[in-house]
Image (spheres, rainbow, N blue to C red):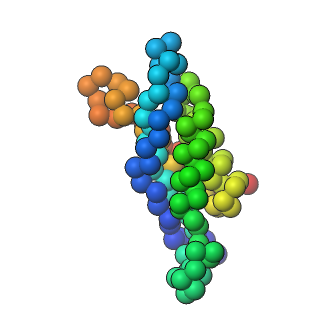
């Protein structure tokens, strides 16, 4: 059975060391994560029990801790590591992750990468 339900985390902002330029390696910048995670929510809907769903607070806390402690040159690399954490540690079968770096390009509001990954 294909899972069509989704659990979303939108606009999760975290400060980290990110970038390839020397000045970027000396400061912390904000990255924003938007996640769409496949999850069968029917059991939780019936039981109304947190144990039966994807704990989005736990996912958020794990990603915040990882991103804050990380130091990557590219948002592509950071996004890939975040996706693997969610899939491997929270047993999410599929996700779409948007990693944004607001203000990275003068004149633009945002730059981002959007990746889709699945287990296996």
Please state the total of marks drawn on the protein image: 0
Determine whether 100 is above or below 71 in the image.
below
Between 58 and 42, the one lying in front of the other is 58
User: Residue 58, located in which quarter of the rendered image?
Assistant: bottom right
Between 95 and 34, the one lying in front of the other is 34
The residue at the point 54 percent across, 83 percent down is 48
Q: Position of residue 24 (x, y in %)?
A: 47, 19
Please, which residue is most extreme toward the right here?
120
Q: Position of residue 81 (x, y in %)?
A: 63, 41
Please, which residue is most extreme toward the left here?
107
Please, which residue is most extreme toward the top here?
22
Between 37 and 67, the one lying in front of the other is 67
Residue 117 visible from this viewpoint: no
The residue at the point 60 percent across, 35 percent down is 69
The residue at the point 46 percent across, 46 percent down is 33
Between 54 and 14, the one lying in front of the other is 14
- Which quarter of the rendering shows the N terminus? bottom right
The residue at the point 62 percent across, 53 percent down is 86
Determine whether 98 is above or below 52 in the image.
above
Determine whether 117 is above or below 107 in the image.
below
């Amino acid at each position: 059975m294909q899972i069509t339900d989704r659990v979303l985390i939108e606009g999760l902002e975290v400060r980290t060391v990110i970038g390839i330029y020397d000045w970027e390696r000396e400061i912390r910048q904000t990255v924003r994560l938007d996640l769409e995670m496949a999850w069968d929510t029917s059991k939780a809907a019936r039981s109304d029990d947190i144990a039966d769903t994807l704990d989005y607070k736990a996912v958020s806390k794990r990603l915040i801790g990882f991103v804050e402690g990380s130091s990557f040159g590219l948002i592509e690399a950071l996004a890939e590591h975040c996706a693997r954490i969610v899939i491997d540690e929270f047993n999410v079968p599929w996700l779409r992750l948007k990693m944004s770096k607001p203000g990275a390009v003068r004149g633009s509001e945002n730059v981002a990468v959007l990746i889709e990954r699945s287990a296996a």
